[in-house]
Image (cartoon, grey):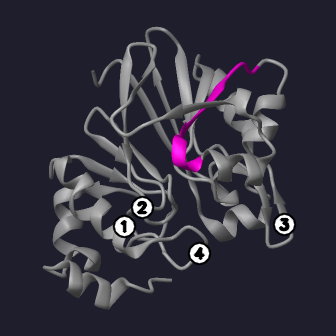
Amino acid sequence: MDDRLYFRQLLAGRDFAPDDQIARQMVNFVYLIGDRETGDAIAVDPAYGPGELVDLLAADGMRLSGALITHYHPDHVGGDLGGWSIAGIAELLALPDVRAKLHVQADEAWGVKRVTGCSDSDLELHASGDVVMVGEIPITLIHTPGHTPGSQCFLVDGKLVSGDTLFLDSCGRTDLPGGDPDALYESLTQKLSVVPDDTVLYPGHMYSAEPNAPMGDVRRTNVVFRPRTRDQWMMMFGNAG
């Protein structure tokens, strides 16, 4: 599938939206995933410069057919962030040539609508294990609550796009509304346990020196995998922030 898979990891504030002060501060990653043969592509968490992302796809001969949402926070979907307005999925859907659905875990729909103003008709709701097809490229959705109730990761051809569930050296905070450290422990140790060690982790932010790493390396070096029991994990990360 490697030759057919189109996959780009883009750093907001550097690879697009270079003049956006908040993008440079928040160091979000946006991902473009597609099928080179059909030209269909989907964007993961297209915040900060939705028009630029569509233009980047067009320059590569691709067209946007949807968006995958890891979770509802404004730095990933757009909206108000501490008084700063971030362009995101609402602006994406308003572009004249865009006809796209927003793929959201069912538990996250309320948050996405509240933060962005998008409506039910804009969303396609999913459960864990659902597969979204982009052309002939299958993307498996894994519900990983903890950072938010409807956080999800995306598994495609040996790559795990993890949003704010898991970073290379840490995990998502659980002290924000909807955060649940016990659920995050379950997500990291059980729901993501099916992901092989040779799968490459692609996180939602550039919080480490490297932009991605094999899951085996992450499991060996990331402090969140150090505790051996739930009680130990809760003692260390129960109020993670």
Q: Position of residue 75 (x, y in %)?
A: 67, 59
Tell me the kind of residue under disc 3: Trp
Mark 4 or mark 1, which has the lower sequence index? 4
Residue wearing tag 2 = 165
Quadrant (top left, top right, bottom left, bottom right) of the N terminus: top left
What kind of element bears circle 1? helix
Percent x, y for residue 12?
64, 54
Question: Do residues under tags 4 and 1 come within 8 Å of each other at their CB atoms?
Answer: no
Callout 2 environment at 10 Å: few (<14), some (14 to 19), or many (20+)? many
Numbered mark located on residue 84 in the image: 3
Distance between the alpha carbons at the discs numbered 4 and 1: 13 Å
Q: Is residue 11 left or right of residue 6?
A: right
- Which amino acid does the dot numbered 4 rest on? Leu
The image shows residue 133 at horizontal and vertical percentages of 43, 20
Residue on which the image places disc 4: 176
Choose mark 1 or mark 3, whichever is in front: 1
Q: Are marks 3 and 2 in contact (CB under 8 Å)?
A: no
Q: Residue at x 54, y 23 (%)?
A: 41
Q: Earlier in the sequence, mark 3 or mark 2?
A: 3
- The secondary element bearing badge 2 is classed as loop
Q: Are marks 1 and 2 in contact (CB under 8 Å)?
A: yes
Tag of residue 120: none
Q: Dot 3: what SS?
A: strand
Please state which amino acid type lies under the numbered disc 1: Leu
**Residue on which the image places disc 1:** 184
Helix, strand or loop for disc 4? loop
Measure how far apart labels 1 and 2 are at the Cα level.
8 Å
Q: Is residue 43 magenta?
A: no
